[in-house]
Amino acid sequence: MSFNPEKMINKTVSSMPPSGIRRFFDVAAEMEDCISLGVGEPDFVTPWHIRDEGIYSLEKGHTHYTSNSGLKELRVEICNYMKRRFSLNYNPDDQVVVTVGGSEAIDLFIRSIVEPGDEILVCEPSFVCYKPIVSLAGGIPVVIETKAENDFRLTPEELKSAITDRTRAVVLPFPNNPTGAVMTKEDLEGIADVLRGTDIMVLSDEIYAELTYGDKRHVSIAEIDGMYDRTVVVSGFSKAYAMTGWRLGYAVGHPALIKAMTKVHQYAIMSAPTTAQYAAIEALKNGDSDIETMRDEYNYRRQVIVAGFNKLGLSCFEPKGAFYCFPCIKSTGMDSNTFCENLLYSKRLAVVPGTAFGESGEGFIRCSYAYSIKNINEALSRTEAFLKEIKK
């Protein structure tokens, strides 16, 4: 009898479908003259002064492991940033862990708190990693479907109705991928009112915190009275500083939570990439103007693409954060997957079906505006031609 490795694979892993995001990208990559509004990363190159610091660290021979928590200087700068940006005080000695991207920080938090059967509340539509990570840790992901009529914000009523005696934590993915939704201070105070008096923790994924538009800047739920100790804030350098390939993130929170997360990190990873850590120090010290430049350009593109979709009859609420819009395609009579497939094959335009981010994304598509205005305008033109064809 021959050995069958498939029988050895963890059942939870076997039952997981592959991410629905990459399939359209892979097809688009093989198409000539295809335009994509699918990939969720900046089209900017990491600013030169940040790259230069990474190069300089190599020239100086900084090629060894750092401490498990990350370089002390980087942890200090992260705390300085959190104080400067959100008026949140963290101790670099025991309240920060530097991770391999924000995704690892999410994984560390979930694995550190979840016991088999614990429930983790996950707002959807949202980034694809939360539910699988909870399942891999033996927990039960419980979806809270946010609604278009609420601009995809979590309401206190929705949160309260989802809580049971098995609820361990709630994931707040705002500013949101894929919808671009944000939670205002007033929104977060309503969420805090529900959580006070419980033992429920908060994982606040704030990777897009610097990419918000309009008069109000992002507010962290850790700033709200009574939320600091129960909240772990996850962030990183990929989106704000165009450093996706550097794979660097971090988490800040109560010392007990960060200690537990660092234990898992120590055994699974050892330490985050050293070169990236030196580059990140430079980003935090001198990168504010880079953020402003990129945010201004995203804001311009945001206005163009949202106005464009609304003009085409695909209603699109105004996203106030991240670099995605989430137009509604229900008027076409197609489901999200069919719409995206037909658009891709007939017009060589790749976008992502809303269902890739949860069932509540049905009837929507995610379009990134982290692309040039030229490509955005061409994408709108191809969408217009597609809509005219299907109406015949």
Image (cartoon, helix red, strand yellow):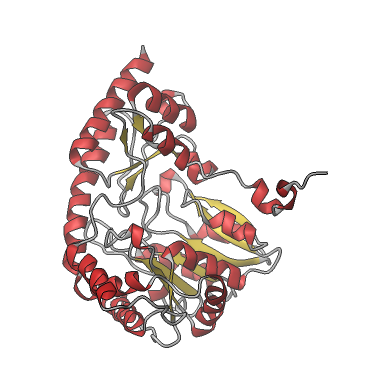
Q: Residue at x 68, y 53 (%)?
A: 12
Question: Residue 35's image quarter?
Answer: top left
- Looking at the picture, does residue 335 appear above or below residue 169? above
Q: Nearer the viewer, residue 4 or 110?
A: 4
Q: Position of residue 373 (x, y in %)?
A: 19, 40
- Looking at the picture, does residue 364 appear above or below residue 83? above
- Looking at the picture, does residue 124 appear above or below residue 262? above
- The answer to whether residue 295 is left or right of residue 174 is left
- The answer to whether residue 231 is left or right of residue 84 is right
Q: Position of residue 198 (x, y in %)?
A: 59, 74
Regarding residue 163, the answer to whether it shows in the image is no
Question: Where, quadrant-wise, is the C terminus in this rendering?
Answer: top left
Q: Which of 182 and 41 is in front in this view?
A: 41
Q: Where is residue 377 in the image (x, y as percent from the top left)?
A: 21, 33
Q: Where is residue 238 in the image (x, y as percent from the top left)?
A: 33, 60
Q: Which residue is drawn at 52% across and 45% down?
A: 19
- The answer to whether residue 290 is left or right of residue 80 is left
Regarding residue 193, the answer to whether it shows in the image is yes
Q: Which residue is at the far top? A: 392
Q: Which residue is drawn at 48% across and 81% down?
A: 254
Q: Residue at x 77, y 47 (%)?
A: 3
Q: Which of 358 and 197 is in front in this view?
A: 358
Question: Where, quadrant-wise, is the N terminus in this rendering?
Answer: top right
Q: Give the number of marks.
A: 0
- The answer to whether residue 135 is left or right of residue 289 is right
Question: Residue 88's image quarter?
Answer: bottom left
- Looking at the picture, does residue 370 appear above or below residue 88? above
Q: Which of 159 and 36 is in front in this view?
A: 36
Q: Which residue is at the far right? A: 1
